[in-house]
Image (spheres, helix red, strand yellow):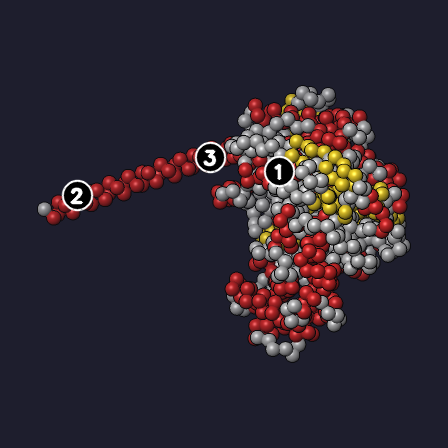
């Protein structure tokens, strides 16, 4: 009986096992089939670079030659077809990115993402980037409007084909919507967003205002980006709570900056000028830039452009090359507005009550009700202190900003693309108004030049944008902009080079105020040090300098830190850490332990001295790095600082923050300090916008990284990182070097790659190149690769 029961049990077990195997096999088969179905489907979405496509919006045939790095060269017989083809090709590569860019700038993310994006949309509706684009469109010439229309036709032609063929990018399927028609206004709105991304310092004004509210004059003035010679008048009116009203504002990364430099032929191996540029912006998949070449009988230009915009914004043609960094001027001004009781849109000005505008901005929300949102605009600009909630308070803050005015940057780009010398290039700059940028220039004929270009406000009575200004007094109004002919300029300097890295660009005798907030000088100092030390600069030398990881901040501060702690009561670990720092060559190399120590030490110094300031307010502290270093320099010289004295003075702050850093790092990387590596913490990861929704999407969309990488926020090899994770999310979004002999040949890195399609070979193929500094070469005259013909 027992044997039968045992036999029955065995049979049942075998049966269950067999069934389990069958079920697992079926699931595996389904997953394999699903994998191949998805793979085949995704393969269909990849950009087409060979063969032919009929495009009814064209007037004549267009050839598109795509090189091995995915750089398309568009050869057209007329300008209408050139820009229509550019719109089509951009949409092939980056349609989802273009869609999300116009939605973010326009404040319509909630339509497709739901309630989670409402506050973000409210903020961008309040700013009114799209309204500013509408005003700008009216200023454009008929020729520029035709370019915008042709570009939009090309984008829409691709959209229509993709909808008919069911080949829209997979992200549209995942989010459950289809894109609407592209318009010229979409391209201009994306341009306005770039001005937003490069900022203008209202955040620092708000932070200074907060400091005076919370800490009083002595401590507040210590953290002002430039200590005021004549202290600003402390407004006695009721304060607007910055902490409550503006802590949820969308703040671009501090110093969305860049490096650029240009070298005279007298200092180069070729005898011709050389130019280098690497704009520092957010790092993500796909890249903010798309590299392209455009050719007709009247122009041949190569470089990069924002996806969704026609033309080439940075690059070169057969005669000239150019690059930009962010000037960082005070182009934004907060105004304290005094509102009439019981009237939402009536404000005081020069003793009279003045009507403001109320703009209806209904916000559609996916799976939710439309929000009836209103924006109040005073004579200065939108009221930004009530974008989360209408408080009805008597005093509010409004924002005046050059980018919210009608401007004509695309007009400038179209002229620059065809410029042949400095005179015609500078003529084009007259129409590039916002954001203000440091343009460097090189020509085949030998000219090198620089201009800080754009609308930079001039204040009455020497006011210089340290604080919000009373909006009810005429004396606080801007009185125009620095005249174009008086903007900072330099042509063929005797020293043989010009460099900018968001550093202070004028001397004290310059008659106009430009900014209170400049980047820390370390990148600029290192660039100049290298340029002055080399007799014959080569292309390789220019590339090496873009990848240079030398930390001038550490070189300045570390010896003083070591001297201050010498002979003090140190733990064994702290002594070992200081010995390692004493041996350091000051390079932020991924394989070294010292950068990990130094950057964590500096971080914890800041955390210690600013611990009274909440994190939400630190986000507005745009000049934090500069202010910290100023406090440290003063303290090293023996000058008192209220922020340091609160915690025992500089020596005690250094000791406490060093020990805290060692404790944190030991927990993560072990007790052997010499085995720590910067690259174990400092890693680059070009994140796709949907990759954080679900681990499966992260696996699909982020195929590379995180990868250890050299550099930091203060080295020429710019690689800023999140302090908590060490993930590099900001840096050189494009690297470019050119020798003007011959100017037809340029060296580039566009990371992570050209394509936004996850199955494309061009999706993240340049990420390793970005880490290692491997440049690809493009040619104006002898482009080879796959050929796609577009027929009318």
**Furthest-front residue in view?**
341
User: In the image, which is nearer the foreground, mark 1 or mark 2?
Assistant: 1
N-terminal of the two: label 3 or label 2? Answer: 2
Q: Which residue is mark 2?
A: 8
| Residue 571 on image: x %, y % | 57, 75
Tell me the SS state at disc 2. helix
Q: Position of residue 445 (x, y in %)?
A: 88, 43
Crowdedness of circle 3 by 10 Å Cα count: few (<14), some, many (20+)? few
Residue 574 in view (yes/no): yes
- Residue shown at the point (66%, 28%) measured from the top left: 182
The picture places residue 360, in percent across and down from the top left corner, at 66, 31
Query: Which one is nearer the viewer's eye here, 201 or 673?
Result: 201
Q: Is residue 599 above or below residue 127?
A: below
- Looking at the rendered structure, the number of numbered marks drawn on it comes to 3
Mark 3 or 2: in front is 2
Which element type, helix, strand or loop, lies under badge 1?
A: helix
Q: Which mark is residue 531?
A: none
Q: Left or right: where does residue 164 sit relative to residue 477? A: left
Distance in Å between CA atoms under marks 1 and 2: 67 Å
Between discs 1 and 2, the one toward the N terminus: 2
Q: Which residue is mark 3?
A: 36
The residue where tag 1 is placed is 121
| Nearer the camera: disc 1 or disc 3 | 1
- For mark 3, give the secondary structure: helix
Q: What is the spatial separation of the Cα atoms under label 3 and label 2, in whole angstroms?
A: 41 Å
Q: Determine contact: label 1, label 3, CB under 8 Å.
A: no
Q: Is residue 716 visible?
A: no
Q: Residue at position x 57%, y 23% from top?
A: 164
């Amino acid at each position: 009986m027992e044997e039968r029961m045992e036999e029955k049990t065995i049979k049942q077990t075998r049966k269950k096992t067999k069934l389990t195997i069958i079920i697992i096999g079926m699931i595996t088969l389904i997953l394999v089939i699903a994998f191949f179905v998805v793979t085949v489907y995704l393969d269909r979405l990849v950009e087409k670079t060979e063969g032919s496509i009929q495009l009814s919006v064209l007037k004549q045939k267009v050839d598109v030659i795509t090189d091995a790095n995915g750089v398309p060269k568009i050869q057209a017989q007329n300008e209408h077809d050139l820009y229509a083809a550019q719109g089509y090709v951009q949409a092939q590569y980056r349609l989802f990115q273009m869609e999300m860019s116009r939605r973010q700038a326009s404040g319509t993310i909630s339509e497709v993402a739901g309630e989670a994006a409402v506050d973000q949309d409210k903020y961008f509706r309040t700013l009114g980037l799209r309204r500013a684009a509408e005003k700008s469109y009216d200023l454009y010439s008929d020729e520029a409007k035709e370019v915008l229309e042709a570009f939009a036709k090309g984008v829409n032609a691709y959209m229509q084909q993709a909808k008919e063929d069911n080949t829209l990018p997979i992200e549209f399927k995942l989010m459950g919507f289809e894109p609407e028609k592209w318009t010229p206004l979409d391209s201009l709105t994306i341009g306005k967003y770039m001005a937003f991304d490069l900022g203008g310092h209202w955040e620092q004004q708000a932070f200074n205002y907060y400091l005076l509210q919370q800490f009083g004059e002595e401590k507040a003035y210590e953290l002002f980006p430039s200590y005021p010679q004549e202290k600003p008048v402390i407004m006695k009116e009721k304060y607007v709570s910055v902490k409550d009203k503006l802590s949820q504002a969308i703040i671009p990364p501090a110093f969305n900056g860049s490096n650029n430099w240009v070298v005279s032929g007298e200092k180069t191996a070729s005898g011709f000028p050389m130019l280098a540029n690497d704009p520092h912006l957010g790092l993500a998949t796909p890249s903010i830039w798309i590299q392209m070449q455009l050719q007709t009988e009247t122009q041949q230009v190569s470089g990069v452009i924002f996806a969704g915009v026609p033309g080439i914004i940075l690059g070169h043609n057969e005669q000239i090359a150019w690059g930009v960094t962010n000037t960082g001027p005070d182009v934004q001004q907060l105004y304290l507005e005094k509102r009439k009781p019981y009237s939402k849109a009536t404000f005081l000005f020069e003793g009279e009550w003045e009507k403001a505008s109320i703009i209806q901005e209904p916000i559609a929300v996916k799976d939710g009700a439309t929000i009836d949102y209103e924006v109040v605009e005073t004579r200065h600009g939108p009221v930004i202190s009530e974008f989360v909630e209408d408080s009805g308070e008597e005093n509010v803050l409004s924002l005046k900003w050059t980018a919210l005015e009608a401007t004509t940057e695309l007009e400038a780009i179209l002229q620059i693309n065809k410029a042949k010398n400095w005179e015609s290039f500078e003529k084009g700059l007259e129409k590039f108004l916002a954001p203000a940028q440091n343009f460097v220039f090189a020509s085949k004929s030998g000219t090198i030049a620089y201009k800080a270009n754009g609308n930079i406000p001039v204040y009455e009575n020497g006011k210089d944008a340290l604080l919000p200004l009373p909006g009810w007094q005429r004396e606080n109004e801007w009185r125009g902009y620095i005249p174009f002919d008086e903007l900072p300029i330099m042509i063929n300097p005797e020293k043989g080079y010009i460099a900018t890295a968001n550093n202070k660009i004028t001397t004290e005798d310059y008659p106009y105020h430009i900014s209170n907030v400049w980047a820390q000088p370390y990148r600029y100092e290192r660039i100049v040090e290298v340029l002055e030390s080399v007799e014959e600069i080569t292309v390789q030398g220019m590339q090496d300098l873009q990848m240079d990881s030398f930390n001038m901040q550490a070189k300045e501060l570390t010896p003083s830190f070591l001297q201050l702690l010498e002979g003090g009561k140190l733990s064994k670990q702290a002594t070992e850490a200081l010995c390692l720092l004493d041996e350091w060559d000051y390079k932020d190399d991924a394989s070294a332990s010292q950068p990990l120590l130094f950057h964590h030490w500096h971080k914890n110094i800041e955390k210690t001295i600013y611990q009274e300031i909440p994190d939400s307010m630190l986000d507005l502290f745009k000049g934090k790095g500069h202010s910290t270093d100023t406090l440290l320099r003063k303290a090293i010289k023996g000058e008192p600082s209220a922020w340091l004295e609160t915690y025992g003075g500089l020596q005690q702050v250094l000791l406490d923050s060093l020990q805290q850093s060692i404790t944190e790092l030991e927990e993560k990387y072990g007790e052997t300090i010499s085995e720590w590596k910067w690259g174990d913490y400092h890693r680059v990861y070009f994140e796709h916008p949907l990759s954080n929704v679900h681990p499966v999407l992260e696996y699909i969309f982020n195929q590379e990284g995180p990868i250890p990488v050299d550099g930091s926020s203060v080295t020429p090899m710019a690689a800023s990182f999140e302090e908590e994770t060490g993930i590099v999310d900001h840096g050189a979004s494009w690297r470019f070097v050119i020798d003007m002999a011959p100017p037809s040949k340029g060296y580039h890195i566009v990371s992570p790659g050209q394509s936004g399609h996850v199955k494309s070979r061009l999706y993240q193929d340049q990420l390793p190149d970005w880490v290692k500094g491997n440049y690809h070469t493009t040619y104006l005259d002898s482009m080879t690769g796959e050929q796609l013909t577009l027929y009318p």
